[in-house]
Amino acid sequence: MTTFKENKGISDRSGSDRQRHRDKIDKAIREGIHDIVADESIIGQDGKKKIKIPVKGIKEYRFVYGENENKKTVGSAPGKNIAKGQKIGQKDRKMPEAPGKAGDQKGEEHYEVEITLDELAAYLFDELKLPNMEKKKFKNISSKSFKRHGYRNHGIRPRLDKKETIKKKIKRRKKAIKNETHDPESDERFGFHHDDLKYRHIKEKKKLTSNAAIFFIMDVSGSMTKEKKFLARSFFFLLYHFIRSKYENVEHAFIAHDTVAKEVSEDDFFGKTSTGGTLVSSGLGKCLDIIDSRYHPEAWNVYVFQCSDGDNWPEDNDFALKYANRLINLSQFFGYCEIEPRNSRDKRWLQLSVLSEIFSSLTRDNFKIAEIRNKDDIWLAFQRFFGGFHE
Amino acid sequence: MSDWNIKDLEEWDEKIIELAKSKNLDWFPISYEICDYYAMIGNMAYHGMPLHYRHWSYGKSFERTHQMYNIGAEGLPYELIINSDPSIAYLMRENPFYLQLLIMCHCIGHSDFFKNNLTFSDTSPENIIQRFKNAKKRIDGYIEDPSIGVEKVERILDAAHALSMHIPPNCKPYIPHKKRRKDLISKIKSGHEDYIGRDPDSYPIEPEIDLLAFIGEMALNLEDWERDLIEIVRQESFYFMPQIRTKIMNEGWACFWHYRLMHELELPQKYHIPFIKSHNQVVRPHLGRINPYHLGFYLFRKIEERHGLEECFIAREVCHDESFIRQYLTAEDCYDLNLFSYSLYKKDYIINEISDSEGWKEIKNSLIKQVGSNSSPKIIVSKLKSNNVLRIHHEHDGRDLELSYAEKVIDYISTLWGGVVRLDTIIEDEPFEI
């Protein structure tokens, strides 16, 4: 007996499995953030630029045959002339693959997805489980601006709108012709009337602008190895795009220092290494200078991020602390991140670094210290800065 | 607005049944469920099973199909029917009337195949729904158990899924090692000359192809619930294996019959051309691939032409794809279908054989290697060492393994095994060990 059953339910049976799958992708992206950004320059890209995200671990691995000379695939070629030795395609140009049951072919996985930076920011930060996002770290600053707002019959000469004025005159002329008060055939000139004049009206508008100035300060002395800079770069990438996603207008400055500080380009920031010693105060001082000259805290939300391996010349410590204090006063947030790969079991890792020790006296809400030892820590450090995450 | 209602379907179903019976088709009763495309994709993700355990891979499968559907890259399959008694089949509400009729005819073909093909004889379709339901219940229980939870369950399921193709293709029951050892000891004692020099303490006694069963029995540190998960995955594989092994025949047989039944149904004229169009769409050859609907339909037609309809019924009973192709695909067919084989040389796909008087045999052999379970590499347990190292062996048939994948699978096996796992294979003609 055949039966027919109408299923009108709107049950979504795969809902929980889809969620589980998405969680896995989220996790993979966060874990892979280091790999994602390794090749990307931080700044100078608008949000539309696409980057590749390698999402690992979502594939379902099986034993499959590799693609090489020995694996022959049979297909049909209806109505085609074919010959031995003929080239019919190229790898990665997507050869048609037999749609088998999942797993019997090394299937095309779509999880090396290309997404734009904007999407990445949304992915990472919007759905981010940052539990107690501290709102006060973000503030909008109001500013006045003027905006056009319709037309008026009176106004000053410079705001005369010629187009609207002529339109008014044409209308008046048409009416005159209709009412037979003006004869278009005649040579009589139809001049402008005072009432034709139209002026643009300008209204004052209070606008909430959101400006952010981001400072990246990094020690580029000899002790900052390539590896440390690599970690710093990934971390800065996250921070930059996070701030960028919160503000309309974002500017930035890279400050590299050894014993003296310089504002440099991104390439130089990560590329160049000096051999000198370390005076942390130089970098902080330079930052204060730039804030003073370009980014007044009344108009800008200032964010300062400093990466270092924790070394400083002892005689500089007092200055460093003083400048840090000043920066904390001026900025929305100041984050100090210590990068020190710990692969050795050196005893000195048991104690605080010079900088951590002096900075630990700074117990302010908008100041945080984080630590990155390997790439898995990047996300944790980020959460520590912005997640209201306390150990 | 659709151009049909359930009453129409019931009315025509009677005609279809009467006609199909007169053709000696013999199928399970069919329960049709009418659903929208969204529910259809959901059902597809779970292989049509009304109840199926949870796993993220089904969510992934859904997303993929849904995405494909939305960008129009892939039409949804016209039918979805499962091997159960009664057979459960799904009709998409959006389909026009003629297409529903075509699908109903097609489903009778499938159900007849499930019921009569010998490959399916041990699938117990009468209680499969219940078995899936029980498995789901148990897995739900493990997921909700505070001492287990979803992460641990997934850890085992992920690993077991990776091995789901590694069961005996003929679904031969597993004989526990302990029993085999006892049998061997008694045979050695009996002094039979075949057993002289055999060591009852070797593991496994015979090379074992049923990886999941062997691990389930012999892994030292698995918990009961973990063994249960492995067995659930294994049982599901046993159930689906016959479908993997008869994809071409099964679709061919269903197409063969929907084509014939639809022709003889005396359809109103307006349905005729759309039906032919849909049919041609389904059985069209795919360039550079094998469309199972196309090859299966073609071969059953040829068999009827060459040996009569009776032979078609015999093939549907005793063959699976491999034996079907071996027995019935001729040089003329290869030429007709313009079959060719190609492989990857460095970065280019190059044709290595075409169906001329020399090449067709080679092509037939290559085709056989890619159908059914032959498309998966054959992996056997070769040795279990006293230090708990599990050695598995790839039976190399000319095709090398994809190493990047193999490594991951070895990790999965280690997860289940709870110890070191080593794989022997051949890569570029040299022995290779992972």
Image (cartoon, rainbow, N blue to C red):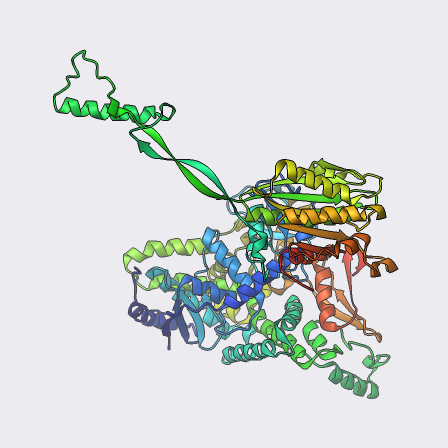
Image position of A362 (left or right of B305):
right
Look at 59% across and 65% down and name the residue there: B323
Image position of A227 (left or right of A74):
right
User: Where residue A315 sits in the image (x, y, percent)?
Assistant: 84, 46
User: Where residue B331 sits in the image (x, y, percent)?
Assistant: 58, 53
User: Where residue B363 sits in the image (x, y, percent)?
Assistant: 62, 53
Q: Quadrant of the C terminus of chain B?
A: bottom right
Look at 77% across and 44% down and name the residue there: A281
Query: Measured along the vertical axis of the image, is residue B181 above or below residue A189?
Result: below
Look at 51% across and 80% down and name the residue there: B130
Query: Measured along the vertical axis of the image, is residue B94 above or below residue A37?
Result: below
Query: Measured along the vertical axis of the image, is residue B268 above or below residue A121?
Result: below
Whether residue A212 is visible, yes or no, is: yes
Query: Measured along the vertical axis of the image, is residue A292 above or below residue A53?
Result: above
Image position of B162 (left or right of B289):
right
Return the residue nearer the eye: A295 or A29: A295
